[in-house]
Amino acid sequence: MKKNVLLIIAILLLGHFLPAQKNARHTDNIIPVGIVKNIPDSALLDIVQRQTFRYFWDYAHPVSGLARERDNAVHAEYYWDYINEAYNEPNLSKGTFGPEACAIGGTGMGILATIVAANRGWVGKDTALKRLIKIVDFLIKADCYHGIYPHFMNGATGKTIPFDRLDDGADIVETSYLMMGLLAAKAYFNGNSLQEKYFQKRVEQMWNVANWNWHSKGENKLLYWHWSPNNDFDMNFPVYGYDEALITYIIAASSPTHPISKELYENCWVKSNGWKNGNTYYGYALPLSNYEKGGPLFFEQYTYMGIDPSGLKDDHGIDYEVQAKNHTLINRAYCIENPKHYKGYGENCWGLTAGDSYRGYIAHCPEVDSGVIQPTAALSSFPYTPGYSMQALKHFYYDLGNKIWGQYGFADGFSETKNWYAKTHLAIDQAPIVVMIENYRSGLIWKLFMQIPDIQNGLKKLGFTSKWMR
């Protein structure tokens, strides 16, 4: 009996420290691990992806399965600097979102991470599908506005949680991330079982009713980010480029029922002051973005979780592979230059993007540099800078792991200058780590998403060409 007990303990300990293999038997319970020394790079990537995915698997809202916005009580002051900068409204209310707040965009990204988890065997494929069915069954009855969902939603009731006093309705950017996840999941769970057919039908229902063109006010001039039954288009915030919202135009143009026009895309996105750059920084040409050195790195990550930038070009001569890679290299080069002399910055510690800081939630970039590194910035750049990203990953994990590694992967941010290390994890920062590392390793999500006929139609409509197009 004693030998059997010792054997069981040994097996449990072994499972605690060794990464799960793709075809290994699983219990759908992902056990977190600490710092495991002297392992191959592939095993390290397994650990980081799998443990980061736990945020969406173990910390999902228990009623709806939606991705919680963050893993602490959500307060609007985390967004204060970002909102004030974006809308130039110094008197915005600092209300409380509350612990039930779930992120619609983060949920879509989490769905992509769930596909990765099912494909790698961290959770059972049938179990993953049940979770996704739970999500779509909830969303089909939840608040939406002409088929477009709000930024935040109460994960227990499905009611909109206002982001601000005017932003209390539809958000097409967040909804585009949701649809990116749902469409990719529909492509992955494409079998003929009753459960798969049911899920496919649910996704089709949401996809077909989403009225993207409503946000154009019936014109081909501007595409508006928000609409509210209480405030109409009073938010008055067009979706200008270049930033994280390229996927919004692609999704909106891809709709089989309520698409936007190429003319609207040209007028609002391409012709905006924020679209083109054309300058060179640290020897790297930057085609797009009105930020001096490209802006936050999530510009090159959110859209490209589904859209493969490799070989992607448009009819304006933009090479999106060059854009994504060079923006990343510029961001890293800035951190190496470190003009403000922050502690820790260097070749193995880089990555400025939006996330938590000791000052709240800020869209960090070379122009807005507070000495805070977000691990998601370098780790979600694996497809563009695999060697440099691995260098950063090993530093984060082996050198700083005792301060920033936890049950849901890496903490959202840290500042060695301020000796500050976040205790939070954000859905929109955790998901890109899982998905973009997977795109680097296997191209899984790119293969699924880029072969969807509707998406190919939308890309063609907007003037894009890609190696994936038939």
Image (cartoon, rainbow, N blue to C red):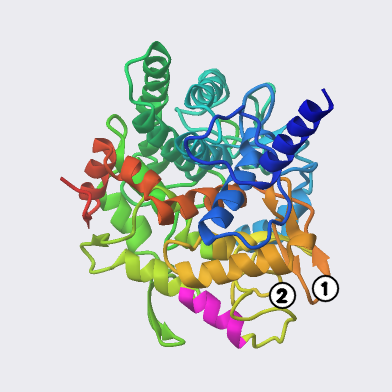
What residue is at 38 percent from the left and 34 percent from the top?
183
Q: Is residue 207 magenta?
A: no
What residue is at 41 percent from the left and 15 percent from the top?
198
What residue is at 28 percent from the left and 38 percent from the top?
452
Q: Nearer the N terminus, badge 1 or badge 2?
A: 2
Visible residue check, residue 141 = yes
Question: Magenta stretch?
Answer: 329-337
Q: Is residue 336 magenta?
A: yes
Q: Which mark is residue 371?
A: 2
Query: Nearest the camera: 159 or 305?
Result: 305
Q: Specify whether 10 is left or right of 150.
A: right
Report the residue marked by disc 1. 418
Q: Specify whether 259 is left or right of 137.
A: left
Type of amino acid at the residue the image marks with label 1: Lys
Quarter holding residue 363? bottom right
Say if 134 sits above or below 299 in the image: above
Q: Which mark is residue 76?
A: none
Query: How dense is the environment of label 1, judged by Cα within 10 Å: few (below 14), some, or many (20 and up)?
Result: few
Query: Nearest the camera: 216 or 239?
Result: 239
Type of amino acid at the residue the image marks with label 2: Gly
